[in-house]
Amino acid sequence: MEGTRGCPLPSPRWAGDQAGSHAPRGYGACYRGDPVGVTQTEQVSEGTKQEAVEAVQRRCQEEVASLQTILKDTISSYEARLSAFQRDSWENVWSRLPRTNPLDSLEKQMEKAQEDTQRLWAIVLPMEQEIAELKAKLAHPESLVQELQREEARWERGTEGKHSLCSSAESLLADPETVSTDLPGSHQAPLMEGGVQQQHGTLEERAKEKANLEEALRCSNEECSKQVQVLLAQIQTSENLLQSLQATVSETQRQTQEQIADLAASHKRLSYKVHRLNAENEGLRGMSSQNPLPTDDETRSLPSMVPELQAMVSKLRQESALQLRAAEHQAERLQIEIISLRERLHEEAASQSSLQGALEREREERELLQASLNSIQSEMERLQQGQEELNRIQPDVREASRLPGRPEA
């Protein structure tokens, strides 16, 4: 054991710092002197490296599992919120659709429902696209996690190869005679140094890869959180748009009901006018169908032959048809006149309202002019009073100016 105390243990720091020409011989002598100590040292270093590798693997697996759980929970929660929002939006829209009105036509109701559906789809489709983009962006962290798992598998395979190398080194160091005969002392130390240095280089590379993957995962999580915030803001905007749409629908429904009431009143007026025109038309038809009773002279002048009677009947029928067509034409003309009179009445009402507005403006201008004229008249009266006062005072002033010159005269 004295040789073990005097010989330094192989370490990566010694492998990088002391690489002189005399080192291999000294360490080869130490290895030949105490192979059991070297074996124990290798076992301790291998156990420490194995524990570190297992700890890193466990930590990576825990991080991967936690990231997968967080991603799945986030996706499921946002899908649930989106489905609930869509369901609430459909319920609100269908609940606020106008109820059946006997004066509304089915075509108008279908058009309104189709417009509301298109507006709702215009709100929902961008949200679905945002969800799809979020899923696509979440796929990148999942690919990074899978890459980390593959790196861990490659790491495990590399550690298995290193374990086989260490076991072969232990088998060589177990027999000092084999070591001394098969391997010269000048080549044992560089071999061990190269293995340890290679292992440390591999560990550093794996640590760098793990740090890079953790940084990429962190960046992906930050980006996902930003996207989630943007999605929440868009959801709030969509809710505001939906509320404005509901207000617009209610306002449109109110205006439609008012228009329906106006149309119903117009329909009543038109039906009354049509009824009156029909009554006039029926009266005209009755007047045309009434024939005076034939007198004695007419009965004497009636023909006695059947062909003459048939010709007279056909002539009377033609005359009655002509009178009927004339009455219908007159009724149509009356309807056209009614429509033209109604349009003229609307135009006259519009012109009357415009004239009333112009008259009101002229009245206001006249009042302003009257007020300015009154102020000018009052100012003129004040000036006239001042002039009269000045004219009344002027003789007294003249007399007062003459008074000092009288004693000298």
Image: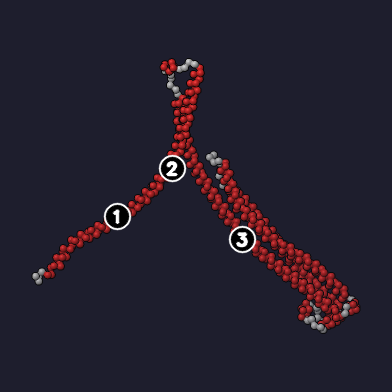
Under mark 2, the amino acid is His
409 lies above or below 274? below
Q: Nearer the viewer, residue 52 or 329?
A: 329
Q: Quadrant of residue 287?
A: top left
Mark 2–mark 1 contact, CB under 8 Å?
A: no
Name which residue lies at 79% across and 73% down.
Answer: 199
**Can residue 6 be seen in the rendering of this structure?**
no
Residue on which the image places disc 2: 346
**Can residue 350 be seen in the rendering of this structure?**
yes
Q: Quadrant of the C terminus?
A: bottom left
Q: Nearer the viewer, mark 2 or mark 3?
A: 2
Name which residue lies at 76% across and 64% down.
Answer: 150
Q: Quick one: label 2, few (<14), some, or many (20+) residues within 10 Å?
A: few
Residue on which the image places disc 3: 229
Give the mark, 2 or 3, whose residue is nearer the N terminus: 3
Name which residue lies at 80% across and 69% down.
Answer: 159
Residue on which the image places disc 1: 373
Residue 234 position within the rendered picture, expressed as x and y whole percent measured from the top left:
60, 57
Q: Nearer the viewer, residue 3 or 356?
A: 356
Under mark 1, the amino acid is Leu
126 lies above or below 168? above
Q: Nearer the viewer, mark 1 or mark 3?
A: 1
